[in-house]
Amino acid sequence: QEAKKEIELDLLIDDENVLTKSLQVPHIYQKYLSVFIKESFILKKMKIELDIMYGIRFKYLREEHSRKLSQSDTESYIMAEESYQKKNLEYQYQELICRFLEEITQKIKNLSFDIKNYVELRIFMGGGKG
């Protein structure tokens, strides 16, 4: 929740902060890009761990059943295992975090245009001087 409030504040443009916000855009962008890179690295590590877990379980199940299990049956057993489901859920959650951060980073990239549009709208509506 606090991260959401911080993002909202970082993206908020109004009459009181438009000038300082325009100067802060590179800093804000760098801040979220750094977080995005860190979280993306965590995601990649989690994917490797998930793949390793899958490979170990796949090999074990195939050897335990003397290769009598089909590939799809083996995959079904792995997907049904609680430990794999838990790890996969953690991975999917991290993936959502990364997608969200990517979208925020894109939004911040466009913040300068948003500020320009805000200023032009204020001028057009008579709230500022041209």
Image: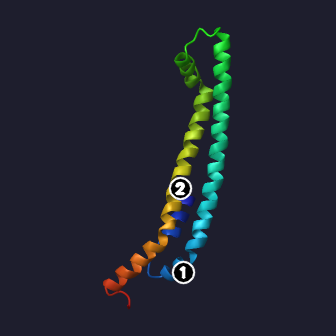
Work out whether residue 116 or residue 18 is closer to the camera in this orientation and state it: 116
The kind of residue on which mark 1 rests is: Thr
Q: Which residue is painted at 61% across and 29% down in the image?
A: 84
**Mark 2 to mark 1 CA distance (whole Å):** 24 Å
Q: Which residue is painted at 68% across and 17% down in the image?
A: 60
Q: x, y (%) of residue 77?
A: 57, 19
Where the C terminus falls, by quadrant? Answer: bottom left
Q: Quadrant of residue 25?
A: bottom right
Q: Nearer the viewer, mark 2 or mark 1?
A: 2
Q: x, y (%) of residue 124?
A: 32, 84
Q: Which residue is painted at 49% across and 68% down in the image?
A: 11
Secondary structure beneath dot 1 equals helix
Q: Is residue 93 above or below residue 62?
A: below
**Residue of label 2:** 102
Counting the numbered discs, the total is: 2
Q: Is residue 79 above or below residue 62?
A: below
Q: x, y (%) of residue 63?
A: 67, 13
**Residue of label 1:** 20
The kind of residue on which mark 2 rests is: Glu
Q: Which residue is painted at 64% across and 44% down in the image?
A: 44
Where the N terminus falls, by quadrant? Answer: bottom right
Q: Earlier in the sequence, mark 2 or mark 1?
A: 1
The label on residue 125 is none
Q: Which color scheme does this rendered protein use?
A: rainbow
Outermost residue toward the left in this view: 125
Secondary structure beneath dot 2 equals helix
Could you classify mark 1 by the number of other residues whose Cα lies within 10 Å: few (under 14), some (14-19), or many (20 or more)?
Answer: few
Outermost residue toward the bottom in this view: 129
Could you classify mark 2 by the number of other residues whose Cα lies within 10 Å: few (under 14), some (14-19), or many (20 or more)?
Answer: some
